[in-house]
Amino acid sequence: LMIGDGLGDSEITIARNYAVGASGRLNIDRVPLTGAVTTHSVEEDEPDTPNYLPDSAPTATAWSTGAKTSNGRISTTPGTDRDLTTLLELAQARGLRVGNVTTSELTDATPAAAMAHISARGCQGPLNMSACAADLKSAGGPGSIAEQAADSGIDVLLGGGRARFDQVIPPGQPNAGRTPLQTADAQGYSVVTDAAGLQAARPGTPLLGLFTAGNMSVDWTGLPAARPASGPQVCQEDQRPADEPSLADMTTRALELLQAPGRGGRKPGFFLQVESASIDKRNHVSQPCEQIGETMQLDEAVGVALDFAEANPDTLVILTGDHAHTSQIVGADQEVPGFASKLTTADGAVMQVSYGTGTTPVGQSHTGSQIRVAAQGPQAANVIGVIDQTDLFRIMRRALRL
């Protein structure tokens, strides 16, 4: 499952125009069967009422569990706060290997929804639990998202967020005085912190890769959008520190580890979720080059997944996003009420990208549009037409025979 956080049709088109030209095609465009997916969440106190502007917590919960929830919730029901079983958990229960890869903090909403259950997405580490008293382990809950990740037994966990795992569990809680990282180590995880460590990892023990204190570094940089428009500009590529693996590197290594033969040489099958997170995060702060670069990181990872599927045709590959976002292509000479930047594309033409859902450059918001879903492999034809994110759960569950 390949996720672009904030990957709407506009973000795909912006990246395509810039990187390969309007008539070019990305790896994203190679995924053959396409449809549209609706993304709305529901109201906390009125779960039959749609909320047309979702965040990543309920959208990721939708494909992870097959159920709608309210904004901010991680795989729990609105109002009643009941845990919802996730696809990843179902796969684990059947003996399949599972992986969760992201360029955000591993405790951020999208990766969290696959593996955790908590009432508020901000309760990421043991010192971030003020809004989640009922989820404390001392209250009979599962603990913070970092604690749940450490307890999860997931075979491959890769991303940022080391600072959450380094928080010391406070007095009165199980494992008080220790960190989630220490509890993960005690439960058999091999911990790696850089690209070399990731490449050296070997199958047989669960792997926890924490490559940055917070979100992982972006790959491209450039001028932010402004009023009047910045640019015309050409983005600065390959800016990610050398010791941080790319999303494609993490995807490649996760596939290798999840496909390693088990007892008797058997390959048990797997479920893997991969997220490029900062398409969304750079959209929020009106940074087109960074946004495009993170879309291209996803595109490289999609290429890895498609190459794997070509060699293993019983593999279902699904590509989608969690919600639409603010960036729009407007006329190159158009004056816009928001913030904009002009970029010189692969066609040698100028493309103006506008951000207009917030009153400041760093205050842009999601939008509520349907977004692309694409797939190939077993069950892939079920994405054709207009479906809802909850349908993705059922499609993947059938493909995995859960």
Image: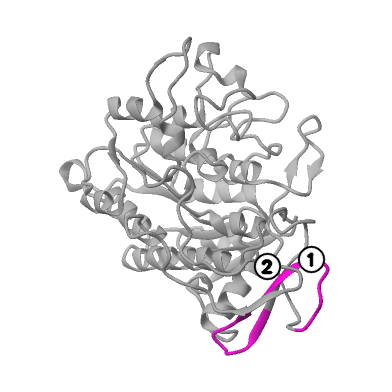
Farthest-out residue, bottom: 348
Magenta stretch: includes residue 342: yes
Three-letter code for the amino acid on which mark 2 is drawn: Ala
Residue at (44% x, 36% y) in the render: 163
Give the structural element (helix, strand or loop) at label 2.
Answer: loop
- Residue 124 located within the stretch drawn in magenta: no
Name the residue at 61% across, 17% down. Answer: 134
Q: Which mark is residue 346?
A: none
First along the sequence among labels 1 and 2:
2
Is 356 located above or below residue 120 in the figure? below
Q: Secondary structure at mark 1?
A: loop
Query: Residue 37 location in percent, x, y?
Result: 66, 58
**Boundaries of the magenta span:** 333-351
State the CA–CA distance, disc 1 to disc 2. 9 Å
- Looking at the image, residue 141 lies above or below residue 338: above
- For this view, does 236 lie left or right of residue 96? right
Q: How many marks?
A: 2
Q: Is residue 68 above or below residue 167?
A: below
Residue 227, given in percent of the width and then of the height, sits at: 76, 69
